Image (cartoon, grey):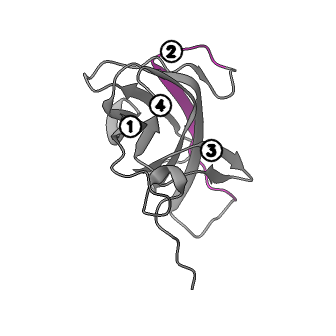
Amino acid sequence: MHIDALIADAVSISRGKLDVVGAGWNHLFVPEVPTNHGRVGLGILVSVRGGPLHRHHSVVVRLDDPTGQPVILGAANGGRESPSDRVEVSFRSRPPFPDSPLDEYVFPIAINLERVVFQHPGVHRFRIAHDGAEVASIPFVIAEASLLASDQPGDGDPLDGGPAGVDS
């Protein structure tokens, strides 16, 4: 079993695939701290190789603040879940179709956290556990926008798009 995860502005599952909007960041600049952030998405890909099929799996995600204390996650998954310090997702491993020639199966998980309140600046961590064992830690920084080194447009300021992309 292997876990890949990324932080994004929003994530969803469509036709068995993880759809991601606004990924590729690990610094979140906010006007001030504490702050109530609208949405943070966490996309997770669980790869299960071999082993018994149709086995139940549990993935638990929690968010720790810079002091190691759990952050109340606000309403998860569009408000369908009550505020808590963790989100749990269960699934059963099975091939996408009978007699698949692959012995590894990928199961996407999309978690959108609404109205998360960040009380402290600094390094926060998503902690991901699979079947009771921590398997991943995804760090990111909450920082006040006033800490940005430069406010000149086009010089890599993360608030105006950062460095220019390259097309080939």
Is residue 22 in sight in this rendering?
Answer: yes
Of helix, strand and loop, which one carries label 1?
Answer: helix
Return the residue at label 3. 11
Compare marks 2 and 4 and give the one earlier in the sequence: 4
x then y, percent, for residue 60: 45, 29
* Residue 26, horizontal then vertical, whole percent: 40, 47
Which type of secondary structure does the marked residue at label 3 adopt?
Answer: strand
- Residue at 69% across, 52% down: 16
In the rendered image, which residue does mark 1 sit on?
146
Apparent side of residue 106 relative to residue 156 in the rendered image (left or right): right
Badge 3: residue crowd in 10 Å (few <14, some 14–19, many ≥20):
many
Q: What's under tag 3, amino acid-wise? A: Val
Q: Are marks 1 and 4 in contact (CB under 8 Å)?
A: no
Closer to the chain start, of discs 1 and 2, is: 2
Quarter in which the C terminus is drawn: bottom right
Amino acid marked by disc 1? Ser
